[in-house]
Amino acid sequence: MDQPKEEDEYGYDLFPERNKEKYKKGSITESLFTFNHKCQVMLQFALETSPYAKLLLSAMKSSGCKVFKERHFSCEDCDGTVSGGFDAASSQIVLCQNNIHQQSHMNRVVTHELIHAYDHCRAHVDWFSNFRHLACSEIRAANLSGDCSFGNEIARFNFGVKQHHQECVRARAIRSILAVRKINREEAEKIVSEVFDTCFNDHAPFGRIPHSKKDAKFAYREYKNRDQYYANL
């Protein structure tokens, strides 16, 4: 898929290193020994230890889309408003090295973007022209990545609302769409509402909403044992 010509209409302005000709990198010392190095270390740790990430990597491999750290992940400086992104034009996950400073944050961002990559692998997603496709993947990413976990919502001082998880997923999906598409809030809310129920209830490849790391571990264990289960039927 060719990268869209109007980059500012698809969120590429939030990721300036996507356009190497316009972007001017900081000093080599700053890049190598601070943000970039730390990002690479945290990424490796996430891929090796996060049950969310390990399940998604296994599912993508089973679907014929094996992920390679050096090819499919890029630690870059980004706009201050974003932590990561999935570049469908290059099938690459961008991790915002200047905005991710804690391992727990890195784990969530990697999981969130791997869900987009998984959707890209398993379905014919029209990321650039079909807002419903984009909205569906954003709903799934917010729902399944831990973005809306109880702990994260308490940290944001968001709690006590009926069906809080659903409302968190809805709000974060709308926010993500508004960040990368030049549409107004009313349009974004309408698009999310149109696909919300179907996409919220699509829990692949977890089989459930992993509300915690413990849930993700159970889901990963079940996924690894699925072949043995079906062989005994």
Image (cartoon, grey):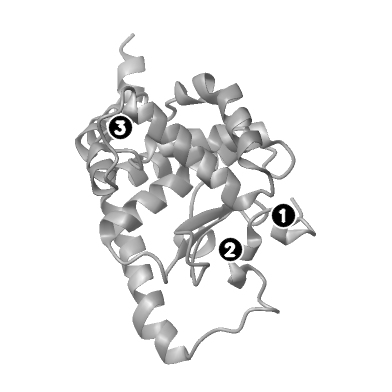
32, above or below 104, in the image = below
Taking the view exactly as shown, the residue that stands out farthest to the left is: 214
Front: mark 1 or 3: 1
Reply above or below: 154 against 81.
above
The answer for how far apart the CA atoms under marks 1 and 2 are is 11 Å
Residue type pointed to by label 3: Pro
Looking at the rendered image, the quarter that the C terminus falls into is top left
Name the residue beneath numbered marker 1: 9
Q: Amino acid at mark 2?
A: Leu
Q: Position of residue 137 (x, y in %)?
A: 54, 36
Q: Secondary structure at mark 2?
A: helix
Tell me the kind of residue under disc 1. Glu
Which residue is at a point 48% across and 57% down the rendered structure image?
Answer: 84
> Which residue is pictured at 69% across the width and 79% down the height?
22
Q: State left or right for residue 163 relative to residue 89.
A: left
The alpha-carbon separation of the residues under discs 2 and 3 comes to: 29 Å
Question: Around disc 3, counting alpha carbons within 10 Å, would you say few (fewer than 14), some (14 to 19), or many (20 or more)?
Answer: many
- The circle on residue 210 is 3
Q: Position of residue 198 (x, y in %)?
A: 53, 19
Which circle's residue, 2 or 3, is located before the other in the chain? 2
Report helix, strand or loop for mark 1: helix
Q: On the rendered structure, is 199 left or right of 10? A: left
